Amino acid sequence: MLEPALEQVFSALSLSVSARFIDSVAYFIEDSVKILLLLAAMIFVIGVLRTYLPREKIAKLLGRTNKFVAHTIAALFGAVTPFCSCSSIPIFVGFLESGAPLGVALSFLITSPLVNEYLVVLMLVAFGLKVTILYIVSGVFIGVIAGMILSRQGLERHLVKDFVNKKTTRERYARFCDRFAFGYSEAVSILKKLWLWVLAGVAVGAVIHNYVAETFVQHALSATGIFSVPLAVLIGVPMYASSAALVPVVGELVAKGVPLGTAIAFMMAAAGLSLPEVIILRRTMKLRLILLFFGVVALAILATGILFNVLV
């Protein structure tokens, strides 16, 4: 943990700062390093893999596959990757670079932060098998359906033109070092485009994470009756946290009287949609696509929260 070291640094500089500020700085440093390293590693790996399976073949394969199956595969892949909404973006970019349809890539981007193996274990302990299975199915279903809806809108024109690399990989790579070099060049190219947006997004997330009180969320959701689910989504969207980290918060909210569906909607919105994610995606998508993406997913989360309140 960085907090003790940062406390010593600020003390040595004779700076009077609050513990909350120190936590925010530590959060910013840790998440920035984690996301940038993940971004570099994943784009490098995907770049190397692309030398074995060129863009045209991937696009052709996905084009021949049944659309529902393609979206389901992408969503299930998202469900087994333990990434938050910001950390999922490198693989989303890799999907696009490999020639995958935008809607299929979005199915991954939606599901990845909502469902992962860590969350499954925590939910089993906190809520039991029935609720856990219902949550997993709901998370994957949101990814599939929202991705399919967005894919029908012809939104590729709303990608930032100079971001997704349109060149193909027809060259023959006789040696692995050539493939390594291609992956390295891809990682460097995309990092140059994204690093500043990543830092800006994580900075906003650090402030929200440490300055928005959990008690405020609990009181707001407990006092709004039938409007609790929409409010939960509205409160959750600006926040930034992993779904696994939010499970204890959801358990505490439920224990204090917040309906389960309302708490689940808050967790999904906070994990799957976040203000830092908007900032990072702004480098890859035009604003209209981001708004449509957030709108469709938010409506799906809203419906899921209401469904949980009715069924559970």
Image (cartoon, helix red, strand yellow):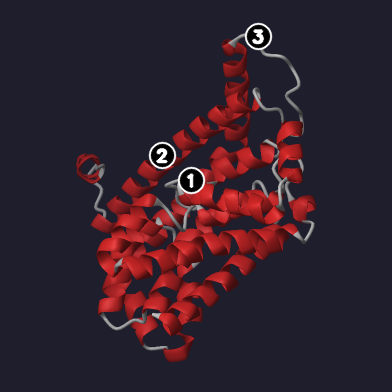
Q: Nearer the viewer, mark 3 or mark 1?
A: 3
| Dot 3 alpha-carbon crowd within 10 angstroms: few under 14, some 14 to 19, many 20 or more | few
Give the residue at mark 1: 87
Kind of residue at badge 3: Ala
**Percent coordinates x, y for residue 65 in the rendering:** 71, 46
Q: Earlier in the sequence, mark 1 or mark 2?
A: 2
Label 2 – label 3 distance at C-alpha? 33 Å
Dot 3: what SS?
loop
In what quadrant of the picture does the C terminus appear? bottom left
Q: Which residue is mark 2?
A: 34
Q: CA distance from mark 3 to mark 1?
A: 33 Å
Q: Which label's residue is closer to the chain start, 2 or 3? A: 2
Q: Image point 67% across, 56% down: which residue? A: 68
Specify the amino acid type for callout 1: Ser
Q: Are marks 2 and 3 in contact (CB under 8 Å)?
A: no
Label tally: 3
Q: Which numbered tag is attached to residue 174?
A: 3
Q: Residue 147 sits in which quadrant?
A: bottom right
Which quadrant would the N terminus be assigned to in this image? top left
Q: CA distance from mark 1 to mark 2?
A: 8 Å
Is 215 on the left or on the right of 300, as rendered? left
Vertical side of 302 occupied by 194: above or below: above
- Observer-nearest of 43 and 173: 173
Pick whichever, 255 or 193, lies toward us.
255
Where residue 272 appears, as percent x and y from the top left, is 50, 60
| Residue 297, x across and y down, in percent | 59, 66
Circle 1/circle 2 CB separation < 8 Å = yes
Kind of residue indicated by mark 2: Lys
